[in-house]
Image (cartoon, helix red, strand yellow):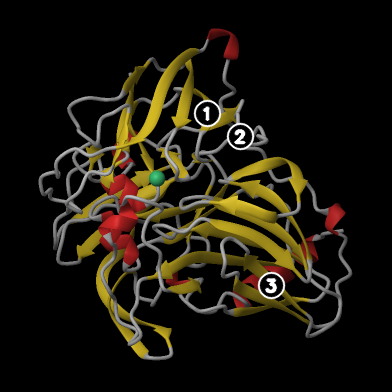
């Protein structure tokens, strides 16, 4: 069983295996009351063997944006310092926090211009794996690097022998290792434009050491602007223990498990007993399967049993009252409206997509008219239909929903903030509108978001 001694060891191991800029200067338990500065800046990074990639955007001092560690129920302060040459903001993906902290320019906060800052302060109500990224010129800024993971800890969580955090994303680089155009219009009108170099923590198929026979908590986030993954683990037993931040009601093996941009998984990985044995996290989607990262067993086996892992601490989530629910329609479609105007947060110059027949171009959606208005505390059911031929990871800010009743896939009743809707799928997303404010509802394939599949709902 896991003991206090394991805790000490686990903490050491997690630190020791956190290389590659994972832990960074904010890797420890932050002092939640002091505002930490986080600089958004231009940089370069060693992503390929062709030398440094120029024109990268990152947060903080290290190459890769730091993993921000918070504690559930504790105030977190951070000052964004914008040293890019364009406006930006930070959105805290999956955190159910005050609307003024949500990071959507114009809708919830001012644009943060070059040389300016913004103070974010909030108390995360839920433990789990989340992530942060800009909500302005999002394709360019995320495509060039601005996306980092968030770990919200709960002291009651079980202790693991190690923890590995993986930021899974692609890069649009040419053969010389330098950036090429972030998108092609004809792809934006389809599945989105794919990256050419695939990475975990900004490295191509990195290897991490972990204790043989140990239980490893693997926290991963799909932070790419386009790619949907079908994840499997080979060479070790693995179970999903949480998805999109919230503990899984029943643990299950990831077997071609699809996750889309914006989604997260927490896995428990039971490392092989034999020193030197290697397990692999793979993406088996499409015609070119990829090994995203590998994990090498080190030391004498700890001989853990994966079934001994206790439950994760539950999050205080609002259970929908289906007997008193109001239904709202959200129909996704293609659009052929005229090109949108340039905005402060950039425009891709096209409208290809729409929600309820309105192409809401750019990072925010038309701020004059919410797509739906909801009363605080009441239950709603979003009836979402996807008659398009593409898969869309739909993300709702500030609230969590429970998917129910799909005509296309088996539903695990599980609270989430991002739902991967399949072509021709109709799904019901049930939620309690318990957080007042204007909440963006958009596709997280950023080209789709930027070319019309963005809107927002209002809770009063
Ligand atoms: Cu989409």
Residue at which label 1 appears = 426
Query: Quadrant location of the N terminus?
Result: bottom right
- Percent x, y for residue 358? 25, 30
Residue 339's quadrant in the figure? top left
Which SS class for mark 3? strand
Residue drawn at (58%, 14%) of the image: 322
Q: Nearer the viewer, residue 326 or 405?
A: 405
Give the CA separation, mark 3 to mark 1: 34 Å
Residue occupying the point 82% across, 59% down: 2
Label 3: how many Cα within 10 Å (few below 14, some 14–19, many 20+): some
Element marked by disc 2: loop
Asked if marks 1 and 2 touch (Cβ < 8 Å), the reply is yes
Query: Which mark, by number, is residue 374?
Result: none
Instruction: Point out the image quarter for the C terminus.
Output: top left
The answer to whether residue 37 is seen in the rendering is: no
Crowding around mark 1 (Cα neighbors within 10 Å: few <14, some 14 to 19, many 20+) is: many
Residue at the spot of label 2: 408
| Farthest residue, direction top | 324
């Amino acid at each position: 069983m896991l003991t206090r001694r394991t805790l000490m060891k686990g903490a050491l191991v997690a630190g020791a295996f956190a290389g590659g800029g994972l832990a960074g200067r904010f890797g420890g338990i932050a002092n939640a009351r002091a505002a930490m500065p986080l600089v958004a800046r231009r940089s370069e990074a060693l992503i390929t063997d062709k030398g440094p990639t120029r024109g990268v955007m990152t947060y903080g001092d290290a190459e890769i944006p730091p993993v921000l560690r918070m504690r559930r129920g504790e105030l977190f302060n951070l000052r964004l310092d914008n040293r890019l040459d364009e406006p930006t903001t930070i959105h805290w993906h999956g955190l159910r926090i005050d609307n003024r902290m949500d990071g959507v320019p114009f809708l919830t906060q001012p644009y943060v211009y070059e040389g300016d800052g913004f103070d974010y302060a909030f108390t995360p109500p839920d433990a789990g794996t989340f992530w942060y990224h800009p909500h302005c010129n999002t394709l360019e800024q995320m495509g060039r690097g601005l996306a980092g993971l968030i770990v919200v800890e709960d002291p009651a969580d079980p202790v693991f022998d190690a923890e590995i955090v993986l930021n899974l994303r692609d890069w649009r680089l040419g053969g010389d290792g330098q950036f090429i155009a972030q998108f092609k219009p004809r792809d934006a009108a389809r599945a989105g434009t794919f990256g050419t170099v695939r990475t975990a923590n900004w490295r191509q198929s990195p290897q991490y050491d972990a204790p043989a026979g140990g239980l490893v908590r693997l926290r991963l986030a799909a932070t790419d602007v386009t790619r949907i993954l079908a994840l499997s683990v080979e060479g070790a037993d693995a179970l999903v223990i949480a998805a999109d931040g919230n503990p899984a009601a029943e643990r299950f093996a990831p077997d071609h498990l699809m996750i889309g941009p914006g989604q997260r998984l927490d896995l428990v990985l039971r490392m092989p007993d034999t020193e030197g044995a290697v397990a692999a996290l793979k993406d088996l989607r499409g015609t070119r399967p990829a090994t995203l990262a590998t994990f090498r067993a080190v030391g004498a086996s700890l001989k853990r049993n994966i079934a001994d892992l206790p439950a994760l601490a539950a999050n205080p989530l609002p259970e929908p009252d289906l007997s008193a629910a109001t239904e709202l329609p959200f129909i996704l479609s293609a659009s052929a409206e005229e090109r949108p105007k340039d905005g402060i947060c950039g425009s891709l110059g096209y409208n290809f997509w729409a929600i309820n027949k309105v192409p809401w171009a750019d990072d925010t959606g038309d701020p004059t008219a919410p797509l739906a208005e909801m009363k605080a505390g009441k239950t709603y059911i979003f009836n979402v239909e996807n008659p398009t031929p593409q898969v869309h990871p739909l993300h709702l800010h500030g609230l969590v929903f429970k998917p129910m009743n799909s005509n296309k896939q088996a539903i695990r009743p599980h609270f989430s903030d991002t739902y991967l809707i399949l072509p021709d799928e109709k799904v019901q997303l049930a939620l309690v509108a318990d957080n007042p404010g204007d909440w963006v509802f958009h596709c997280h394939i950023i080209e789709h978001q930027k070319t019309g599949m963005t809107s927002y709902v209002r809770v009063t």
